Amino acid sequence: MEDDDLLYTLALQHVPNIGDILAKRLIAHCGTAKAVMQSKKETLLKIDGIGTHTLRNFFDVTHLKAAENEIAFIADNAIKVSYFKDEKYPVALKHCIDSPVLLFETGTINVTESPVISIVGTRKITNSGVAFCERLVEVLKPYNPVIVSGFAYGTDISAHKSAIENSLQTIGCLAHGLNQIYPKVHKKYMAAVEANGGFLTDFWSSDTFDRNNFLKRNRVIAGLSEATIVIESAEKGGSLVTADIAHSYNRDVFAVPGRPTDKLSTGCNNLIKSQKAHMLTNPLDVPYMLNWQLEKTSKPAVQKQLFVELDATEKVIYNYLKTEHKQQLDAIALHCKIPIFKVSSTLLNMELKGVIRPLPGKLFEVV
């Protein structure tokens, strides 16, 4: 992303009442954030969702000044920035309507080659909860998943530590800027996380520390992942918010059940009871339900059928995958403008015809 583009995108973000959804709508209408910030008031008022209240203080010069200060912080700390239109922006997150316009990261994060799951739960995790988390990550190791969590007390840090112990990539999604760390006691784990993944946030270094930021951060945890796993949770808690968001994104959710009398099992039991989550009793349930496949060292040669006949719907999907390469079912349905139930059955027919193949993480590609 060019410095000029970053400057005006940050300036747009700094405007009060402009969230990620509205910012992306403005950029889509005007072409770039710079074009948005340099538009006339009467032009912006013609855009759906923009009113005089939204444009109050919109043209204040302080927005560009704040953006300049943040760019200086980014440069001084070698922070990587991903724009929502960039190829390197996480594909799974890109398809969420409220995904961040900008992501800031440190470390060596790579979510393009492995399945991504999030592991969340209570900050007061029990010994049995820790044991299940450790066993879960250990069993999943052969599938090489990326483990995402929030770097908080309890379940989060257990997930990160388990990933590191099993040499898996892990991502800490933060509810604040990259100029600080919370909780401070977890600072000792930062180097290990960055060496095995890194940290991700959509908050600026100037953002004040706020409890509401944790709820906003949870959409990134859910959006990055093809599945969210809740280890333990009371009747209310941030991990349940993450599970609800993941469910709203049409992502898989798993919950570890517990005895009805256990306070820290209430949230998980309720998720299962309301059919918002699959019951997770065996770590191998995860790759089974997500249709993960272990990589084989050698694959038998397949004779490709020539002159396969495709119907109109199959041709649309085939041409899209041929251009975009690996894509998830949701993305195929969205971009091809085909109902998701029809995409599922069509993909199965195409797989039987030998023109596409499924990949780990509910991805599909042309053979």
Image (cartoon, rainbow, N blue to C red):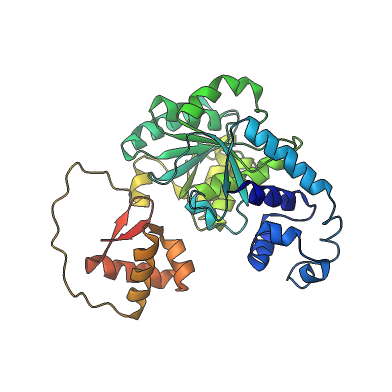
Q: In this view, does 180 lie above or below 338?
A: above
Q: Quadrant of residue 206?
A: top right
Q: In terms of depth relative to the viewer, which is nearer, 360 or 84?
A: 84
Q: Where is residue 152 in the image (x, y as percent from the top left)?
A: 60, 31
* Left or right of 196, for residue 260: right
Q: Residue at x 25, y 66 (%)?
A: 355
* Left or right of 168, for residue 9: right
Q: Is residue 12 above or below residue 185?
A: below
Q: Residue at x 72, y 50 (%)?
A: 13
Q: Residue at x 17, y 49 (%)?
A: 299
Q: Position of residue 222 (x, y in %)?
A: 54, 48
Q: In terms of depth relative to the viewer, which is nearer, 289 or 31?
A: 31
Q: In this view, does 345 lie above or below 263?
A: below
Q: In which quarter of the image is residue 55?
A: bottom right
Q: Where is residue 367 in the image (x, y as percent from the top left)?
A: 25, 61
The answer to whether residue 345 is visible is no
Q: In terms of depth relative to the viewer, which is nearer, 146 or 304?
A: 304
* Left or right of 350, for residue 130: right
Q: Position of residue 272 (x, y in %)?
A: 50, 50
The answer to whether residue 171 is visible is yes
| Figure label count | 0
* Left or right of 349, for residue 197: right
